[in-house]
Amino acid sequence: MTSCTGRSTVRYDCTLRCCRQDCHSDFCQSVSCAEREQEKQQQKTRAGRVFERYVQPCLAELLGSTLFIFAGCVSVVSNAGVPGTMQPALAHGLALAIVIAVFGEISGGHFNPAVSVCVYLTGGMELILLLPYVLAQMFGGMIGAGLVKVISPSIEYNNVSGAAFSAVKSTEDIGAVTVSEVVMTLFLTMVVSMAAVNGKTRSQFAPFCIGLTVTANILAGGMISGACMNPARAFGPAVVASYWDYHWVYWVGPLAGAMLTVSIVRFLLGDEKTRIIMK
């Protein structure tokens, strides 16, 4: 218990107002110490709540996106000239599972604009956080891709266009690549929605399910479209390597896949809280 003392030898309990004549403390004549401490604590609590609710999640998305995209891009550069997609598949999937497990309790572990849009539209996050999340993910993508450029040999880096997506060589490839991205992102966002957002099917193994889904998609569709599924993963290397050929495909495909997931979850597979029909 905190207490205050005036010039008198008597100590006064600070939970009470000290308005007696023998207490000469100006503070005690105005307000009790306990009230003052409570007010300070409330101010600190409010500031902490704002930080933890709005600032900390964005920082987690920034750092997590940086680490995930760094690991993914490094694996692509290191795999230059090697047939197959085993190394990028494992690197992307493992890195994503790890950052989701580490940062998931802070931000939800999105690290992907398509995932953030899907989570918001299925009721898993506030609208006020959507744009900051997307911006944090895009900045994280640029930082991660920039670090890859710094540490990579220029020949290998240039051979893979800085790990930017270059599967579309002509307009004839647009259809196949876009459909591939739509389906793979549908798969990814469905796993996110059902394993991490939907109350009825939520699983403690969500980080590993999501990481394995990315690995499976890259193994299955990496040779078709590059298996992006993540506009931030496409945006970062595109900025750093200045490679923008058909870049829009890697926004349209993943976002379309996310919207299909939203429709399925909202109308068919979501729990009572999530569904908008047949409640």
Image: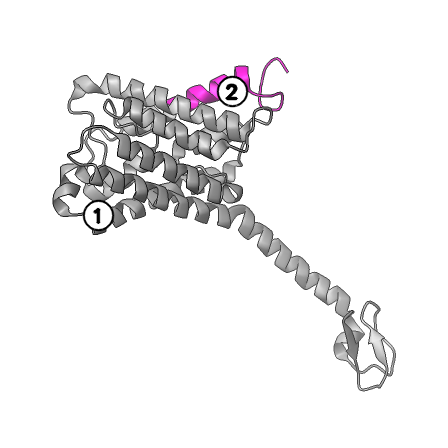
Which residue is at 86% across, 83% downward? 22
Secondary structure beneath label 2: helix
Looking at this view, name the residue that lies furthest to the left. 155
Which sits in the foreground, 27 or 64?
Answer: 64
Magenta range is 257-279
The quadrant where residue 157 appears:
top left
Q: In this orientation, does residue 123 appear? A: no
Q: Image quadrant for the N terminus?
A: bottom right
State the count of labels. 2
Which residue is at 30% across, 22% downward? 220
Q: In this orientation, does residue 192 appear? A: yes
Q: In the rendered view, does 253 fall on the left or right side of 36?
A: left
Which residue is at 43% across, 44% downward? 61
Which one is in front in this view, the residue at disc 1 or the one at disc 2? 1
Secondary structure beneath label 1: helix
Give the residue number, with chain letter if any, for mark 2: 265
Which sits in the foreground, 174 or 222?
Answer: 222
When the figure is inspected, residue 123 is found, relative to residue 171, above or below; the finding is: below
The answer to the question of whether label 1 and label 2 lie on touching residues, with beta carbons closer than 8 A, is no
Tag 1: residue type?
Lys
Which residue is at 54% across, 32% downward? 124
